[in-house]
């Protein structure tokens, strides 16, 4: 357990006096590492509260810059940072709020070439992105790296959040020749539905992750070069 300084004891006092957290829980928070995808409408409050709670290391990936239209909802940014990379703006806000927190910034898109290496050093992954291809990519990477995943999404006045300790929140990929008799598991608005014979695939030569448009129907237990975009290796072969 961390040997708290007097300043830390004062700062985290309201956590430490809670039986469900205590000094041991606060120590675990300070030693934990969380990786976030997105520093926008979802990522902003998440990063802010994680930092306030004393999560010791926060990694943030976002390739965008702050725009004035972001400021009515993306609370981690401000007027003076318009035009600044969002990850740098977030880092400045977090470090001003809590100097205990180390912020690792990734000012680029996560792709099938880099995501697995990035998330290996983190304990928890939080997906606050705004597109389906990235969502599927993050889900795949968490599944294969065995990382817990929290995925959040919102549209106007609707929102959803899903948590998986197995790293397979949005879609479970069938593998090998048994795939045709298995079923992908989808989570949408809190409901699970099973669609036998479907799996998301990577189509060689078409430039990347296909997201929902990349679902391919298994026919007679056969696939042709079906691969996972998160790691680029074959996941299902002809039965």
Image (tube, grey):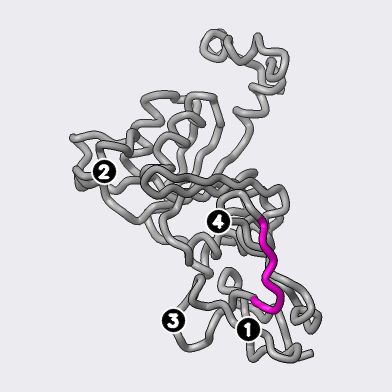
Q: What residue is pinned by disc 2?
A: 70
Q: Nearer the viewer, mark 4 or mark 1?
A: 1
Question: Residue 4: which quarter of the image?
Answer: top right
Q: What residue is pinned by disc 3?
A: 207
Between the residue at mark 2 and the residue at mark 4, the CA separation in whole angstroms equals 27 Å
Q: Earlier in the sequence, mark 4 or mark 1?
A: 4
Camera sees residue 212? yes
Q: Nearer the viewer, mark 1 or mark 3?
A: 1
Question: x%, y% of residue 2?
Answer: 67, 22
Q: Is residue 186 above or below residue 213?
A: above
Camera sees residue 122? no
Dot 1 falls on a residue whose secondary structure is strand
196 in the magenta segment: yes
Q: Which residues are magenta?
A: 192-198
Q: Is residue 165 above or below residue 10?
A: below
Between the residue at mark 3 and the residue at mark 2, the CA separation in whole angstroms equals 30 Å
Say which residue appears at 45% left-offset and 36% top-offset: 47
Say which residue appears at 73% left-offset and 71% top-offset: 183
Say whether marks 3 and 4 touch (CB < 8 Å). no
Q: Nearer the viewer, mark 2 or mark 1?
A: 1
Say which residue appears at 79% left-offset and 84% top-offset: 177
Q: What residue is pinned by disc 1?
A: 217
């Amino acid at each position: 357990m961390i040997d708290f300084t007097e300043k830390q004891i004062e700062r985290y006092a309201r956590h430490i006096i809670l039986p469900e957290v205590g000094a041991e829980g606060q120590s675990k928070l300070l030693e934990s590492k969380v990786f976030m995808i997105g520093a926008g409408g979802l990522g902003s409050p998440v990063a802010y509260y994680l930092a306030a709670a004393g999560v010791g290391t926060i990694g943030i990936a976002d390739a965008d810059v702050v725009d004035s239209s972001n400021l009515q909802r993306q609370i981690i940014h401000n007027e003076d940072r318009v035009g600044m990379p969002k990850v740098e703006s977030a880092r400045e806000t977090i470090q001003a709020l809590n100097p205990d927190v180390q912020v690792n910034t990734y000012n680029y898109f996560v792709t099938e070439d880099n995501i697995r290496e990035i998330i290996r050093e983190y304990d928890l992954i939080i997906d606050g992105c705004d597109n389906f291809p990235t969502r599927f990519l993050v889900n795949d990477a968490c599944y294969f790296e065995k990382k817990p995943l929290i995925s959040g999404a919102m549209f106007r006045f609707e929102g959803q959040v899903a948590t998986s300790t197995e790293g397979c929140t949005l879609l479970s990929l069938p593998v090998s020749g048994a795939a045709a008799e298995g079923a992908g598991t989808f989570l949408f608005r809190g409901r699970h539905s099973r669609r036998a014979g479907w799996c998301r695939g990577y189509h060689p030569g078409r430039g990347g992750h296909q997201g929902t448009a990349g679902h391919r129907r298994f026919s007679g237990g056969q696939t042709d070069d079906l691969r996972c975009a998160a790691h680029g290796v074959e996941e299902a072969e002809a039965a």
